[in-house]
Image: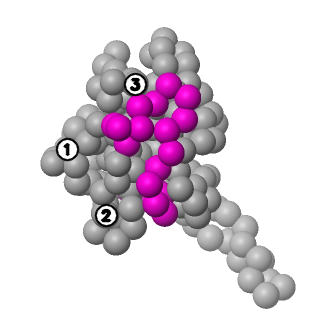
Amino acid sequence: MRRQLLPVMVPVMITGTIALVIGGASAAAHSGSSAQSAKAATIQLRKVGHFGKILVNAHGQTLYLFEKDKHGKSACNGQCSQFWPPALTTGKPHAGSGVRSSKLGTTRRKNGKLQVTYNGHPLYAYAGDSKAGQANGEGSHNFGAAWYVMNARGSAVKH
């Protein structure tokens, strides 16, 4: 299942003038990931639909693994990271309810930022999930491989 995100126009105030900025549908997801990057990330479990308990960030946004990632390193950069924003942190991520801290880690991205990993898999949000509890990216095959939500063991949940 392939999804195409449409660009949106966002008003931006620039010294008393309103400018329209055309951006991807990931604008909301990026603001969440940017806010998350301002401190150590918290990863927790939350029951989401028929998936059962899966990994989410502190805002309840579903987190995904990308099957193209190898050896704990992200293969999602550039345009990919606009649609699949990485779960960023400024230090050691915190284990929330149901998450094993021994499975949490980080990997350094090409841009030098720290991305949260779980069981060796870099974690990402999906720009198509507009609110907590959604998992619209599950099973997508964007950017060369499949995307899946993760359970507490750190395995892909494939439905």
| Up/down of 147 relative to 71, above or below | above
Q: Work out whether mark 2 precedes mark 3 in sequence or the reverse, and give the earlier one.
A: 2
Pick whichever, 107 or 100, lies toward us.
Answer: 100
Type of amino acid under label 1? Lys
Where on the picture, by quarter, is residue 15? bottom right
The C terminus lies in quadrant: top left
Residue wearing tag 3: 152
| Up/down of 145 relative to 17, above or below | above
Q: Residues within 10 Å of mark 3 (few under 14, many from 20)?
A: some
Q: Work out whether mark 1 precedes mark 2 in sequence or the reverse, and give the earlier one.
A: 1
Type of amino acid under label 2? Arg
Residue 83 seen in the figure: no
Between circles 1 and 2, the one closer to the viewer is 2
x then y, percent, for residue 10: 67, 63
Residue 152 seen in the figure: yes
Element class at badge 3? loop
Q: Work out whether mark 1 precedes mark 3 in sequence or the reverse, and give the earlier one.
A: 1
Residue wearing tag 1: 68
Q: Going 60% across and 35% down the picture, which residue do you hit?
A: 60
Q: Going 63% across and 41% down the picture, which residue do you hit?
A: 59
Type of amino acid under label 3? Ala
**Which numbered dot is residue 117?**
none
The N terminus lies in quadrant: top left
Q: CA distance from mark 1 to mark 2?
A: 15 Å
Between circles 1 and 3, the one closer to the viewer is 3
- The magenta stretch spans which residues? 81-104
x then y, percent, for residue 141: 28, 36
Residue wearing tag 2: 109
Pick whichever, 104 or 145, lies toward us.
Answer: 104
